[in-house]
Image: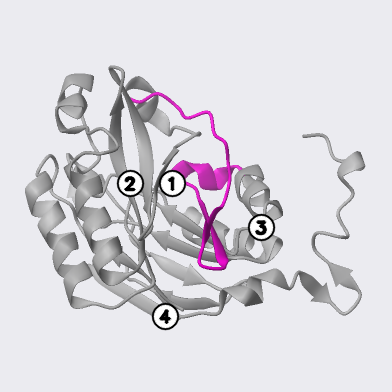
Amino acid sequence: MRVGFYQFAPKLGNKNHNLRKVAKVLEENRLDLLVLPELFNTGYVFESFDELYAVSEPIDGPTARLLVKFAKHKNMVIVGGFAERSLGRVYNSALIVTPHSTHVYRKIHLFYKEKELFVSGDGPLVPYEVDGWRLGVIICFDWLFPEACRTLALKGADIIAHPANLVLPYAQNAMITRAIENGVYVILANRVGEEREIRFTGGSEIISPKGEILVKAPEDKEMLGIVEIDPKLARDKRFTPLNDIFEDRKPHLYFL
């Protein structure tokens, strides 16, 4: 299975430019799964709700239509973040587009000033079944809450896609732990560049269930990262011949 991330620098508010860049990558490459950054089509640092609302879209808007077109044409799955408009509110969401269906995950844990602009999602955290493998999705700051990845893994996710606009350096390291402790692949798609004096930290990566970094992007350059994986390897939860990371859990002793 050929999976990848596209790390790039979206232009704030310029959806046509951002969608053209992504369309070029999709047209020129063969992938089974591509993960794009959080809010990849609009940029991130909005100063007001009105500014954000002007570039938000419903789930059947132009961004979704573009991804659906390529998912069908290329027989692939695409995950990418967008500002979802619904009933006068805006959610920090991710589209999960397969050749046959479209799903939306709404970010649960909003970061910093996102709380002034977006409405947080209320789940559920569920993996999506695609041709014999299962895909879970979290968005950016969701990484800090290990329960999110654990929930997806317990429900059978083989791969966790992680669209992000990271401005701090911690998640890139923490997601190695998330991969190991859950025995899943992680595809972290961050962005690069600056917006209104906010610098993004890049470092997109694909991590194996054993915590190996299979491919990693630099902190400050655009990159399409691609690697071959076998999602079935994520179903072996043995840590040693005598330990299984799920069977050895003691949920009755945990306070959650």
**Residue type marked 2:** Gly
Cα distance between the residues tagged 2 and 3: 23 Å
Which residue occupies 67% across, 66% down? Answer: 183
Q: Position of residue 119 (x, y in %)?
A: 40, 23
Dot 2 lies on which element? strand
Marks 3 and 4, how far apart at CA: 22 Å
Q: Amino acid at mark 3?
A: Gly
Q: Which residues are magenta?
A: 118-145
Is tag 1's residue or tag 3's residue first in the polypeptide sequence?
Answer: 1
Query: Could you tell whether 207 is left or right of 46 in the image?
Result: right
Q: Secondary structure at mark 1?
A: helix
Res. 156 mark: 3
Q: Which residue is mark 1?
A: 140
How many angstroms separate mark 1 from mark 2 (CA)? 10 Å
Q: Which residue is mark 4?
A: 227
Residue displayed at 53% across by 48% down: 143
- Quick check: can you spot residue 17? yes
Give the mark nearest the N terminus, 2 or 3. 2
Q: Quadrant of residue 7?
A: bottom left
Find numbered disc 3 in the image and state the secondary structure of the residue it sits on.
loop
* Residue type highlighted by circle 1: Cys
Q: Give the residue drawn at x 69%, y 70%.
A: 235
- Mark 2 or 3, closer to the camera: 3
- Name the mark on residue 81: 2
Identify whether 165 is placed above or below 108.
Answer: below
- Viewer-side residue, 34 vs 146: 34
Q: CA distance from mark 4 to mark 2?
A: 21 Å
Residue lying farthest to the front in this orientation: 100
Looking at the image, residue 30 sits to the left or right of residue 127; the answer is left
Q: Looking at the image, is 119 positioned above or below residue 165?
A: above
| Label 3 Cα neighbours within 10 Å, binned few <14 / some 14-19 / many ≥20 | many
